[in-house]
């Protein structure tokens, strides 16, 4: 599973983390809406393809940027999501990509 930044998941059950995230999303967002995702991953073409595939059935816009040394790519994605479950589902799909860091 990928590392999640901005949340201390060490020693935490991933399902408990996603359950907590869902609750926070429901408290702070008015779904359906555009939701902003940010990811960093190794600068490998296959990783970018996997990211596109995770958002395949979602209306989204994406912008990418190479790191200064070109070792990594950052991706900012704005996706139209229906509810908190949809947000969590997309995070789970992306978490299956080796080496991705979710911000």
Image (spheres, helix red, strand yellow):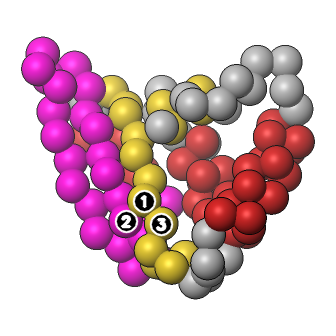
User: Going 74% across and 26% down the picture, which residue do you hit?
Assistant: 9
Answer whether residue 35 is magenta in the image: no
Q: Do the CB atoms of the residues marked 2 and 3 lie less than 8 Å apart?
A: yes
The residue segment tinted magenta is 52-79
Disc marking residue 36: 1
- According to the picture, the residue beneath numbered tag 2 turns out to be 78
- Calculate the distance from the C-alpha at mark 2 to the C-alpha at mark 3: 5 Å
Examine the rendered structure and indicate whether residue 80 appears above or below residue 17: below
Label 2 vs 3, first from the N-terminus: 3
Q: Are there few (<14), some (14-19), or many (20+) residues within 10 Å of tag 1?
A: some
Answer whether residue 65 is magenta in the image: yes
- Calculate the distance from the C-alpha at mark 3 to the C-alpha at mark 1: 4 Å
Q: Quadrant of the N terminus?
A: top right
User: Going 22% across and 20% down the picture, which residue do you hit?
Assistant: 71
Q: Position of residue 65 (x, y in %)?
A: 17, 40
Q: Position of residue 31 (x, y in %)?
A: 61, 80
Q: Are there few (<14), some (14-19), or many (20+) residues within 10 Å of tag 3?
A: some
Would you say 99 lies left or right of 13 here?
left
Q: Position of residue 38 (x, y in %)?
A: 40, 46
Q: Secondary structure at mark 1?
A: strand
Disc marking residue 35: 3
Q: Position of residue 46 (x, y in %)?
A: 33, 42
Q: Secondary structure at mark 2?
A: strand
Disc marking residue 2: none
Label 2 vs 1, first from the N-terminus: 1
Examine the rendered structure and indicate whether residue 38 appears above or below residue 71: below
Q: Quadrant of residue 32?
A: bottom right
Q: Secondary structure at mark 3?
A: strand
Would you say 93 lies left or right of 48 here?
right
């Amino acid at each position: 599973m990928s590392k999640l930044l901005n949340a201390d998941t060490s020693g935490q059950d991933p399902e408990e983390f996603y359950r907590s995230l869902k609750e926070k999303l429901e408290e702070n967002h008015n779904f359906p809406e555009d939701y902003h995702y940010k990811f960093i991953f190794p600068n490998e073409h296959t990783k970018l393809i996997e990211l596109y595939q995770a958002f395949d059935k979602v209306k989204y816009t994406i912008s990418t940027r190479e790191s200064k040394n070109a070792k990594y790519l950052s991706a900012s994605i704005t996706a139209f999501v229906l509810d908190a479950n949809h947000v969590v589902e997309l995070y789970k799909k992306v978490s299956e990509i080796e080496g991705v860091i979710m911000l």
